[in-house]
Image (cartoon, rainbow, N blue to C red):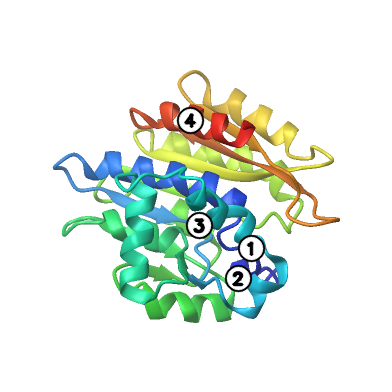
Amino acid sequence: MLSYQHSFHAGNAADVHKHALLAVALARLAGKDKPFTYAETHAGRGLYDLTAPEAARTGEARAGIVRALDRGWFPYDHPLRAALAATRTRHGPDTYPGSPLIARHFLRPGDVAHLAELHPQEHAALADVAGFAHLHRQDGFEMANAILPPTPRRGMLLIDPSYEVKADYDRIPGIVGRLARKWNVGVIAVWYPILGDDRQAAMARELTETAGAGALASEVRFPPARAGHGMAGSGMFVINPPFGLADEAARLARLFAA
């Protein structure tokens, strides 16, 4: 399906959770001299305008990144705050980076990025801001299967589908298991929504069973962004989490709980 566009949801509470963990993980990878690969299966357009009609219609950014910044969740030395500041310096004060531009902030000469996006308009917009990466207009799972294990071998894969295709909940644990076997040293992160009917719960359990000990499961809950909105939280499952990521997950859990 190609109907999903993240412009309506950019900067929401789930993005705050997901992107904080992503930024901390990437900062850890970039903290070592060895080069690394960043890959993403569902990249979106990479850059969002929080004053655009789509964002204004839902108000999700006001309940997400705007509120988090107002409440001081991210000090100036936090990796997400640094990536956000770099994006706004380059593109304007009302912009918000999707995961590709968060990754861009941490990539160095010698590091490599692969971004997959199948939606034609989203891919075209991504091409305007992601000249630093290898772009793939194809199914992201096919891309990941083709490039793993990557060169450089160190690195991170973000799996972040829209879950509009409900079969994703059933097939993602198997996909993740196969990719983890191909790339046993890679950081593999899977984001998923927490929904009112808990349809994600079986997938989360199966991911834990597939990955075994050492994986990180981070879940936070928050009020629906508006009446009738089905998402009540955000989950991030990480295989081979970098040192310190569990501490950030615990910090975010406390903030969201409060």
Residue 183 position (above or below residue 86): above
Residue that numbered label 1 is attached to:
9
47 or 143, which lies in front?
47
Between disc 1 and disc 4, whose residue precedes? 1
Q: Marks 2 and 3: CB-CB under 8 Å? A: no
Q: CA distance from mark 2 to mark 3?
A: 18 Å
Q: Secondary structure at mark 1?
A: loop
Q: Which residue is mark 3?
A: 41
* Residue 71 located left or right of residue 88: right
Q: Are marks 4 and 2 in contact (CB under 8 Å)?
A: no
The residues tagged by marks 4 and 2 sit, at their Cα atoms, a distance apart of 27 Å
Measured from the top left, where is residue 18 in percent x and y? 52, 46
Q: Is residue 90 above or below residue 30?
A: below
Q: Which mark is residue 157?
A: none
Location of residue 115 by image quarter: bottom left
Disc 4 target residue: 251
Image x and y of residue 69, in percent = 48, 52
89 to 28, vertically: above or below? below
State the residue in front, 165 or 101. Answer: 101
